Amino acid sequence: MRYRKLGRTGFQVSEIGYGAWGIGGGLWAGADDRQSVEALHHAIGLGLNFIDTALAYGNGHSEKLVGQVVRETRHKIYVATKVPPKNQLWPARQGIDISEVFPYDHILRTTERSLQNLGLETIDLQQLHVWNPEWIARDDWKRAFEELKRSGKVRAVGVSINDHQPDSALELIKNGLIDTVQVIYNIFDQSPEMNLFTLAMEKNIGVIARVPLDEGGLTGRIDQHTQFDPSEFRARYFKGDRKQQVAERVAAIQRDLGIQNGDMPELALRFCLSHPAVATVIPGMRSRQNVDFNLGVPGKGPLPEKVLTILKKHAWERNFYGA
Ligand SMILES: NC(=O)c1ccc[n+]([C@@H]2O[C@H](COP(=O)([O-])OP(=O)(O)OC[C@H]3O[C@@H](n4cnc5c(N)ncnc54)[C@H](OP(=O)(O)O)[C@@H]3O)[C@@H](O)[C@H]2O)c1
């Protein structure tokens, strides 16, 4: 495993971190606790030391599994979790006041719940689970974060940026209000490269790259025949002819690079790690097999420039989380 500094937090985090949404169940069908715990332990054994979870993932279930594993290991693991929006609306909507989303008491109370679920005394990184730039001048959320840091319940604070809106965090970074950002960054959505990454590097803000595999779209395993459990959010994410669209885009990448379906997960993760602004990439993983594969990727190094140039053409602007 290789490690990078998570901006001004100073945390030396593994290049591959653990995306722990799927293990929580809830919007993801087919999670198996025994398998998830085994996969987490296996990842830690291979040098992974950063886990991203959230109170909302399976209503605390992901945090409970993560906490169990972190308490069982002797290694230092950096745990990141998130404050859910009080109004339960993902993503943040324009025009809704922050008092409905992140009031002071809500941030403190939900952090306490996360600490209980995790069974830990401190959260290494607490993140707001949505962000709306209209809230920048408001003070409640800043006071809550300051209080959590002061009391030692939280070591660093960040924001998980709304889907496909990387520029909505620029003012936060300019004003030095957060230590990290979590952003969608993958072969399809390369937009953080434009402004966010440059500014984050300049201001020494840690970048966590989420959804590196486009919820599975970039694994090469989704085509028009793929079936998702109707209860799973991906049944909506990949609704209508979207599976077909994704499969065609992936086939075009493969044609341009002369690679196969099975090469896609490595390509997708190496793509993210090729940018120096990125501290850690957090693929969602639930099986030992995916852990084994993904944790082998940092050893392959960044992608060659000519591959990155070809991949620029494959950026694809769309938002499957919306409508
Ligand atoms: N708003 C937010 O803050 C937000 C939103 C989304 C995600 N996140 C964070 O980002 C993390 C990553 O995003 P994600 O999990 O939604 O999507 P993702 O990482 O893009 O894709 C996860 C999917 O890829 C599969 N996969 C992983 N490694 C694979 C491999 N080597 N070969 C084939 N398939 C593989 C997983 O399978 P299995 O699950 O079966 O192993 C899962 O179906 C989340 O877990 C969460 O921590 C945050």
Image (tube, helix red, strand yellow):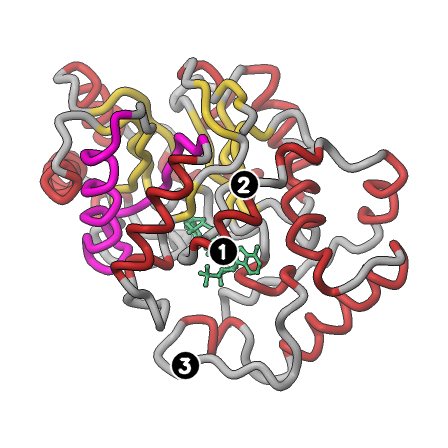
Using the image, tell me which numbered label, if any, was put on residue 295.
2
For mark 1, give the secondary structure. Answer: helix
Task: Tell me how far mark 1 sits from mark 2, CA to CA.
Answer: 10 Å
Does mark 1's beta carbon lie closer than 8 Å to ligand 1?
A: yes
Which residue is drawn at the image coordinates 63% and 40% (left, top)?
A: 297
Residue 124 versus residue 221 in the image, above or below: above
Task: Report if residue 61 lies within the magenta region.
Answer: yes
For mark 3, give the secondary structure. Answer: loop
Task: Tell me how far mark 3 sits from mark 1, CA to CA.
Answer: 21 Å
Which residue is drawn at the image coordinates 46% and 38% (left, top)?
A: 17
Residue 83 versus residue 74 in the image, above or below: below
Q: Earlier in the sequence, mark 3 or mark 1?
A: 3
**Circle 3 or circle 2, nearest the eye:** 2
Instruction: Identify the amino acid type marked 2.
Output: Leu
Q: Position of residue 148 (x, y in %)?
A: 18, 23
Q: Earlier in the sequence, mark 3 or mark 2?
A: 3
For mark 2, give the secondary structure. Answer: helix
Q: Position of residue 19 (x, y in %)?
A: 42, 47
Instruction: Identify the amino acid type marked 3.
Output: Asp
Decide: few, some or many residues near mark 2? Use Cα within 10 Å; few <14, some 14-19, many ≥20: many
Q: Earlier in the sequence, mark 1 or mark 2?
A: 1
Residue 231 versus residue 166 in the image, above or below: below
List the residue tagged with mark 1: 289
Task: Tell me how far mark 3 sits from mark 2, CA to CA.
Answer: 28 Å
Instruction: Identify the amino acid type marked 1.
Output: Gln
- The residue range painted magenta reads 47-74
List the residue tagged with mark 3: 229
Which corner quadrant of the image does residue 127 belong to?
A: top left
